[in-house]
Amino acid sequence: MTLCTPARTPNRPRVQRPHSPPGGARRLRPAGADVSASIAVFLIALPLSLGIALATGAPLQAGLVAAAVGGLVAGRLGGSPLQVSGPAAGLTVVTAELIQRYGWRTTCAITVLAGLAQLALAALRVARSALMVSPAIVHGMVAGIGVTIALAQLHIVLGGTPQSSAVSNALRLPAQLADARPAALVISGLTIAVLLGWPRLPGRVGRSLRKAPAALVGVGGATLLALAAGLTVPRVDLPSWSSHALPGLPDGPVLGIAAGVLTITLVTSVQSLLSAVAVDKLVAARPDRGKGVPRSDLDRELAGQGAANMVSGALGGLPVAGVAVRSVANVSAGAVSRASTMLHGLWIVLAALLLVPAIDLIPLAALAALVMVVGIQMVSITHIRTVTRHREVAVYAVTVTGVVLVGVLEGVALGIAVAVAVAMSRLARTRITREDRDGRQLLRVRGQLTFLAVPRLSRALHQIPAGSEVTVELDGSFMDHAAYETLNDWTAGHRAHGGRVELTGPTGGRITGSSAGHAPGADTDAESDTDGGPDASPHASPHACCRPWTPWHNHQCAERPAPPVAPAEEPPVRTGHQLAHGIGKFQRNTAPLVRDELARLAREGQTPSQLFLTCADSRLVTSMITSSGPGDLFTVRNVGNLVPLPGEESGDDSVAAAIEYAVDVLRVQSITVCGHSGCGAMQALLGAGPDEPATPLRRWLRHGRPSLERMASRRHAWARISGRLPADAVEQLCLTNVVQQLEHLRAYESVARRLADGSLTLHGMYFHVGEAQAYLLSGDEVRGYDDVFDSVPPAILAAKAS
């Protein structure tokens, strides 16, 4: 395994930061894949930039300036190497409104100020904060902008002129339909047909043709048709660069200018950061798993976007943001560095200087049709289904309506307000029901117990007959002090009148006390037990064995030795089998939430990204330590996380079959062998004597003898954990065993074949149970020197697992 020196080791060689420009101070040397990817992106960006400039009412050259600056400046300085920046359709409505209200020169000045604001935000390192905005609001904002764009461009498609607002465009649409221009309809109809049909061309010929961007083919075909048929339609008219308008001093009300700066800053920042996150996912999904491409540094990306907006505004260009369509094309074309983004900007510059005569032949109707289709596609059916599944339709609908009717900033503000109201409503939504079961009263409380639910809780409690036997079942993740006092006071009073009260969690486990601010039987799948009695202090600490994963942990909190019981109370009584109660809670609470996802997996089958081979130890919970869910891992567990060598005598068909199925059928991209501290199998292996009977366990553990031999061999130095030697021989064997089993994996023909073609990687992992700390062993070869397991921060481990 490759030596991974821990961060605190002295004299560590200086390593270049992962997000610094490739090669440090050296020149960028683009790979062949970067050159081809840059050409593909350029062919998409050129017509789109002109179309977006047309839609905003800005000079058409402003779109080319923004595209060039986005490629050269944001591409060089940004923190997302493969993200492409330029004029974005999502900024069309905002920019058009600013141009109409303040004029073009002031709009350029606003763009410069917005770039300065982005640089300030990047210096404060708040980029991650932009991602906390509800996805329903972001999707609603994008959809609202798309609707506004489509309504405006539809008028140009029909041969007319758009109005100043979406409402006006909708109201004037019937008259425009009656007065449609046939020549414009032919041009735009052809463009739309190519845009929609080109990606669906069938067969081998279609696959070859689809390599040309649909946007370029659609606009180029419409231009050739207009020239061949001699159609008289408005065309692109790029004025001389000598008359290009540059920014002037902001001219308008201060509050209006500030609102414009805020809107541009908000929209460009959120769009760019969300796009950067999406690009990371696209890169990770490539066959090469994004090898050599660093993940996005969001603060640096925000700074790069700010610098690009300042330069674009100063040169008379449109606002710049990271754009999804061009970024997807860049990733799909196989780009491997920021050189592709920068080269696309260079091609834009050359086209703006050398291809003006050809650009002037493009009909405006073709560009309008292109932008209209982009606007319609911004209303994503997938996003609508997602927000519906998460019960956020109201947030989405209000945001869309607000953006279309009022404006982007106002629509987002309305969406945030509704999102907060929905969250508060869910927090306050508490169901309280009461049943009489053969004389025993059952009071169920579903949801959070806050002061908002106290009146209903108090009413339900006082409807219970005095002196009766009562079970109060609490199912929630939070109980505030007001609710605790109400429940505690009623419990004391009911017992004083001869009644009996039992508090239980959702799995039926008896609760002997509760803490204000933490409900027994938490909705996070926790039950809370305290050491005190029913009248325990609100600040009593929860029982040490009850944690947020207790439903799958068959814990016995209710059966621990209890303190002496007062005469008025009864000893704890179990209310049923813990496993049955856990299943019941899953069916009530968890199954409705995961049913859609599991139904999808049932339809599509499993496509896990990695084979995870680990020990059968009950303390090792793979989904918890890897932050994974259904369908993510193909997991194989056995005593000692052993990989028997293939062969008739020493092999094991069960493990070998799982490896073959995962590698050849499921086509996993990686295999992880995970050992853990205090492994009972390793302890048994160390303590095994030569004369012990050959039990099934002893016969199985013979597959671990190569690990013992490796640990004793002088050719192999002891493995280290974060630079330190293991605490004892058991820990050393646990670490050595991980390294040895990785070596065993290479003996399998299917694994060796996939390793040779670079489509499979092996990883070693060690989980220290007592520290709740994961350690990774990286590299592709097992070496004869120290193997070092380095501690992994939780965020990095989750990212690797996902």
Image (cartoon, rainbow, N blue to C red):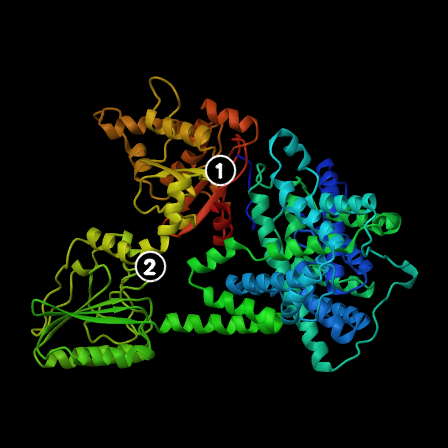
194 left or right of 534?
right
Q: Position of residue 556 (x, y in %)?
A: 20, 56
Answer whether residue 510 is visible to the viewer in this image. yes
Please report whichever mark, 1 or 2, sits nearer to the chain's N-terminal start: 2
Q: Nearer the viewer, mark 1 or mark 2?
A: 2
Q: Position of residue 275 (x, y in %)?
A: 61, 55
Q: Amino acid at mark 1?
A: His
Towards the viewer: 277 or 138: 138
Q: Position of residue 342 (x, y in %)?
A: 76, 48
| Disc 2 target residue | 548
Q: Amino acid at mark 2?
A: Pro
| Furthest residue in direction top, as rendered | 648
Seen in the picture, residue 604 relative to 166 is either above or below; the reply is above
Seen in the picture, residue 193 relative to 169 is either above or below; the reply is above
290 left or right of 351?
left
Towards the viewer: 506 or 313: 313
Q: Give the Cα distance between marks 1 and 2.
A: 29 Å
| Disc 1 target residue | 763
Q: How many marks?
A: 2
| Furthest residue in direction right, as rendered | 242
The crowd level at tag 1 (other Cα within 10 Å; few <14, some 14-19, many 20+) is: some
181 left or right of 361?
left
Q: Position of residue 122 (x, y in %)?
A: 66, 64
246 left or right of 681?
right
Q: Secondary structure at mark 2?
A: loop
Using the rendered view, name the quadrant where residue 160 is placed.
bottom right
Q: Residue at x 67, y 41 (%)?
A: 336
Q: Secondary structure at mark 1?
A: strand
Callouts 1 and 2 close, C-beta under 8 Å: no
Seen in the picture, residue 720 relative to 560 is either above or below; the reply is above
